[in-house]
Amino acid sequence: MEGHKDVLFGLYDDEDDLIHAIQKAQKDHLDIHDVFTPFPVHGLDEVMGLSESRLHIAGFVYGALGTLTAFLFMSWVFTRDWPIIFGGKPYWSVPAFIPITFELTVLFSCVGMVITYYTVCGMGPGADNPTLHDRITDDKFCLAFNVSDSSKEEIDSLKGFLSGTGATELNIKTI
Amino acid sequence: MNQFTFTGRERMVLLSLIVLGALCLAGTYFVEPATMTVMNHGHEETVSTYHMRFWSNFLQNSVYFLGMAFVAMFGYCAFITAYGGWFSGMKRLWEAYALWMGPALIMMAVLVAGVFFHWHHLYHWNAEGVLDPTDAHYDEIIAGKSAFLNKYWYAASALIFVGIWYFITLRIRSISVAEDSADVGDYSYHGRARNWMAAYLPFVAFTSAIFIWQLMMSIDAHWYSTMYAWNATASFFVGMLSLTVLMLIYLKSRGYYPNVTENHMHDIGKYLFGFSVFWTYTWFSQYMLIWYSNNGEETIYFLTRRDQYPILFYGNLVINFVLPFLILIRNSSKRKFGTIGLVAAITFFGHWFDIFYMIKPGALINIAGSQEAATELGSVAGYWFPGLLELGAFIGFTALFIYFTFSKLSQASLVPEKDPYYGESVTHHVI
């Protein structure tokens, strides 16, 4: 099938087993397809050699954009477009703008980060995200290999590796 | 290395800084003229300065360091009652800070004696005749507050409340030190310390506010703000965390605390960042609510500070909010000792500067007799901006505090290996 792949995966009961399995796989020069865990595991990024996420840079940019939007918009409205005196204060009353500026900073920052995250990860409405196993989102830790082009011997040796490192369940799924 | 040694060289450096500080503090007593000429209600008047520059410096420094001591204990107790363990490897440092309440009690006794015997004129509510309706100095607003703003409540805040904090701190410290000789797996010490901590938290939460109202806010006796105690406590907390960062960097450079890593620094950095923002929140809210409601008796406080002390007013915001916020916002800057050490040095000075801003303008008003007369005086040395003598006094107090901390660190094991949470602290991992 075009674009589909066969994935061999093993489920572990404990995150320590998973981390040790990853370390062993790297030592054996096995090509890991992906790792799935029900919660963020400390040290996993480091072991897998993933670079630091750049999402927070996007978050800062969105936040700064929110600050500017709120502050400049209010400044324009209250000095040019529709100046009104509130409580004897000057038109351009900076302290009164601060709470709304703060709110819009937070709003832009978090909504922007959510949209960026979903876009980058290919998630969100309409996206096709096959799950290998239901319990990966509950209490199992999954290590997956892409075996689309592997021979039976290679698959057998990977199966041996998975059960040898403590995987309690093995399976092959086409996604 | 589980035993801290206070080297002779450190003693020498700190002692000479303490002497420098003492000289500067004494200098503020003598350089200030004994009298000032002020314009009061359209006529010239000669008023005594009551050595206000000396007393306000003394108050500022003793309150700042006592504040850091009680808030160190507060953080320590709050983390332990919340089952936190990440910091337990370095808890001796916070215990040592908290024990500063002992020397601070002596300073408080000096201030209380000053109120009783009229050595100083820091508090206008303590002046002669303000409560007497027949007297020319009668002050109706202060008379209305005299049930709370009086020397007995002042003594209670400065001596009894602080004394009780100190007593609880001593109990917790002795249990913590006794734990070092406990059997492995004996958690009874921890449980006993926890009971004292649970008592300390609510007690200090309420009484510290009273302490801050009496010692600091009542300098401007006509004005009040419910945010003030929060703001001051946040200041103390950030100051304490900054000093912790600097002290850890120094102790690590001497080879101690190998198990305190950038992960611990990251967590302290998060608190430093968070409480800097919290401080800004209270600082701004206090300002904005008063600015918005525009009651004359409240706005005069900020009007004076904004227009007469713009460097204190805006400088405060820059060094205590803008700089720590922008520098610490990135994850990695909390983990680099150089960056977080720089921020800690800025905020440690910055919150001393903030206490300066809280105390000095009001002290000048108390000399001049009225807000208008103080405004006429303009920039008076030692009040409008920290002068060299003020900085010297600050360095002296800091050296004394560090000297005390080092001597307390050397009196017990540096790392509490029997603490039930010690293992958690060693393996603490943030990313």
Image (cartoon, helix red, strand yellow):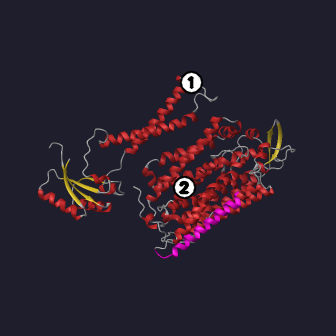
Residue in the foreground of this view, choosing between B30 and A85: A85
Protein chain holding label 2? B
Outermost residue to the right: B134
Q: Is residue A19 magenta?
A: no
Same subunit, labels 2 and 1: the answer reads no
Taken as a whole, is the magenta stretch helix, strand or loop? Answer: helix
Q: Residues within 10 Å of mark 2 (few under 14, many from 20)?
A: many
Q: Which residue is mark 1?
A: A83
Question: How much space separates mark 2 and mark 1, taking CA atoms?
Answer: 44 Å
Q: Position of residue B317 (x, y in %)?
A: 57, 43
Q: Looking at the figure, which quarter contains the N terminus of chain A?
A: top left
Q: Nearer the viewer, residue A160 or B403?
A: A160
Q: Which residue is mark 2?
A: B242
Chain letter behind tag 1: A
Instruction: Name the kind of residue labelled 2 in the image.
Output: Ser
Residue appearing at x 18%, y 43% in the figure: A3
Element on which disc 2 rests: helix
Residue B77 versus residue B406: which sits nearer the camera? Answer: B77
Residue B136, compared with residue B345, is above or below; it is above
Q: Amino acid at mark 1?
A: Pro
Whole-percent x, y for residue B143 in the image: 79, 46
Question: What stretch of residues is rendered in magenta?
Answer: B157-184
Q: Residue at x 64, y 55 (%)?
A: B206
**Residue A120: in sight, yes or no?**
yes
Residue B258 location (% of width, % of height): 45, 66
Q: Is residue B341 above or below residue A89?
A: below
- Quarter of the figure with residue A93: top right
Q: A63 above or below B53?
A: above
Q: Is residue B337 visible?
A: no
Tell me, for residue B167, which label it has, or none: none
The part of the image, by quadrant, that contains residue B95 is bottom right
